[in-house]
Image: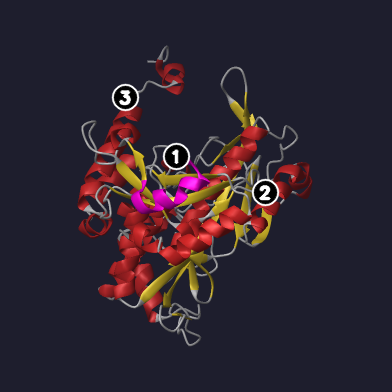
Amino acid sequence: MIGIVESNNKVLEETLKYIEGKKIKLALASFSDLNGSLRAKLIPSSRLQSVCQSGAGFAGFAVGDLGHGPHDPDILCIPDLRSMTILPWNKEIAWFAGTLTEDGTPWPFCTRTILLNVLTQAKSMGYTMKTGVEPEFFLVKQGEDGKIAPFDEQDKELKPCYQQQALMRNIEFLGTLIEYMNELKWNVTQADHEDANGQFEINFDFSDAVTSADRHTFFKYMIRTMAEERGLIATFMPKPFSNLTGNGCHMHLSLWDEREERNVFEDAHDPKGFGLSAVAYHFIAGILNHAKALAAIVCPTVNSYKRLGALNSSSGSTWAPNFISYGGNNRTQLIRIPDAGRIEFRAMDGSCNPYLATAAILAAGLDGIEKRMDPGDPFNGNLYMFHSIENEFDKLPSTLNEAIEALESDEVLVKALGETFMETFIKRKKAEWKEYHDYVSEWEVEKYLKGY
């Protein structure tokens, strides 16, 4: 079990010494469920050593979708000591990302383990993956009628992106968040007001894929905690407002030679002029080839498809991709090439499980490398304006149901992420789609009650 191996005596000894020196009283042994929600147990720091050795026990069936019935033994969470994160707002508590086991072997329903498994495949090919994410979120308030609105009542401009006045009205929240993130050594690069009213984005340094997924997971927890403390709701919901831009979570990524610490995506002699290598183009082709199935993982909710593929918002653009395409520094593409040596995947949204999404993107790209796929020529026009190109490019799925059907028939992704786990994931998502489809909405009543 990877978590147990990583908790070797030397690392454990150093961690315990650090915890004692910092007067940390409690530890959160945490893991992500299928949807990316955090589950945890609170452990006195004096018991951390025993938990690292034998795990924190959970009734797996109570969590749901962990491959457990009510009759099964405990599922055990083994903290990865490298992931230790001291809560900036309560320095007496340390958070640990964990991997799951039942008998000492990796558990197939652990999404962090799924990512580690795909990274092992990459390692066998000589690669390691580095990623950086750009999580977008809204700060909203909820009225007595249950309806939500942007927290900042003065944030009403039709094109509010980068609006300095709106940014500074929220400086207490954003400034505190940046302080926390830098305290954690994440190295914030910038923060901005995004394209929708009440929407923000924080950018921070890239890292290895597991560390970035851990940070992304903790980031969502930290933002929500900060909002709750202020009587607000922080939401990563892909499309909380029908007229506004949705919450994307763009991922910047590159592959590196593990032995030489060299970016294998970079090539100054790229004949296409983007500074990418043949390996990078094969990787891009793999993502394009699996894009429809990949959507079910990186855009995993019914609401995701209200964002994905939408053409208009009150600001004039949704900034979400419509077509399965790639190009240069062009934000209308599924895959953008912002700079030499890296690509940006723009379909992913705020509802994804960070571990599962990273694993799926990597698996798709590795398949492109293994099969030496060709992505074809890049497209550099405005994909939001050229509806006639539908015959040239495939479109991304328009519903969760369409994406799940694509995933179900994608043998490469199903195998890479684990057939047992994927059977459960697909079943859950089909049920989610049916629940949505069967629900009679307020819109339907208003539209059809008297008119038909």
- The label shown at residue 177 is 2
Residue at 62 percent across and 22 percent down: it is 143
Pick whichever of labels 2 and 1 is earlier in the sequence.
1
Residue 170 appears in which quarter of the rendering? top right
Secondary structure type for disc 1: strand
Magenta stretch, main secondary structure, is helix
Pick whichever of labels 3 and 2 is earlier in the sequence.
2
Eye-nearest disc, 1 or 3? 1
- In the rendered structure, the answer to whether residue 113 lies left or right of residue 27 reads left
Q: Which residue is mark 1?
A: 41
Does 8 appear above or below 292? Answer: below
Residue range highlighted in magenta? 42-55
Residue 151 place in picture, x, y as percent: 68, 33
- In the rendered structure, the answer to whether residue 233 lies left or right of residue 63 reads right
Residue 167 place in picture, x, y as percent: 74, 47
Q: Residues within 10 Å of mark 3 (few under 14, many from 20)?
A: few
Residue 353 place in picture, x, y as percent: 41, 48
Pick whichever of labels 1 and 3 is earlier in the sequence.
1
Query: In the rendered structure, does residue 51 fall within the stretch colored magenta?
Result: yes
Q: Is residue 359 visible?
A: yes
Does 269 appear above or below 99? Answer: below
